[in-house]
Amino acid sequence: MSKHYPAIAFTDDVQHAQSEHGSDTFYRRKAVAGSASAGPDPLTDDEQVFLRERDGFYLATVSQTGWPYVQFRGGPPGFVHTLDEHTIAWADFRGNLQYISTGNLSGDDRVAIIAMDYARRTRLKIFGRARIVSAEADAELAHSLADPAYEAVVERSVVVSVDAFDWNCPQHITPRFSVAELEPGLSRLQGRIETLEAENAELRHRLTGAS
């Protein structure tokens, strides 16, 4: 985890729970280091590459009623851009028109992001502060974040200043694979099937001719 992460995540209530369950000794040093860290923590190459390869993530915002709201954000791999070591951004596409995340961010800019690589059982958590930039207000930014090959209406850009992050262990992550991830193996299998079918057809032809 990054240095500033415990200062955000390890509240008094969390540290009390850690003490009850016996993990406080392990995390106490990180909590002390987190309190001493001014933050924000820079994204390393590992986090930047991981985010760039994702085709989706989960975004949590906070409503006026205090309820958390989690929504999936998706796009072609590479739709999450790293503007610098402290900032990520993406083009926000037209969806179901509820605008709950957008509305929440107008009152509270804090966000939490969970990005998953199910195939490799890897998970990255991010704390940050988001700002909404309409496509009309900054067309150049929206254009730079959009993928011309992806047919979707870009309504706004979302720019997140990253405060802290943490990598989770793979325990309990069920492996799942997208069509794109399965395609290389399926193509090889399909090629093998076609070869075997051709061989079988040739054998049947020879047997028919010999009878």
Image: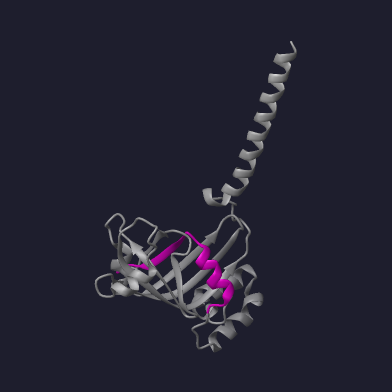
- Magenta segment boundaries in residue numbering: 43-64
The vertical placement of 205 against 60, above or below, is above
Residue 48: in magenta span: yes
**Which quadrant of the figure contains the C terminus?**
top right
The residue lying at 70 percent from left, 29 percent from top is: 199
For the question of whether residue 65 can be seen, the reply is no
Residue 52 rendering spot, x and y as whole percentages: 50, 67
Residue 105 is drawn in which quadrant? bottom left
Q: In this view, which residue lies farthest toward the top? A: 211
Colouring of the image: one colour
Residue 101 is drawn in which quadrant? bottom left
The residue lying at 35 percent from left, 75 percent from top is: 109
Left or right of 75, for residue 51: right
Left or right of 49, for residue 87: left
Residue 57: in magenta span: yes
The residue lying at 35 percent from left, 55 percent from top is: 151
Number of numbered discs = 0
Residue 132 rendering spot, x and y as whole percentages: 31, 72
**Which quadrant of the figure contains the N terminus?**
bottom right
Residue 76 rendering spot, x and y as whole percentages: 44, 58
The residue lying at 55 percent from left, 89 percent from top is: 36
Q: In this view, which residue lies farthest toward the right? A: 210
Q: Nearer the viewer, residue 189 or 105?
A: 189
For the question of whether residue 55 can be seen, the reply is yes
Q: In this view, which residue lies farthest toward the left? A: 136
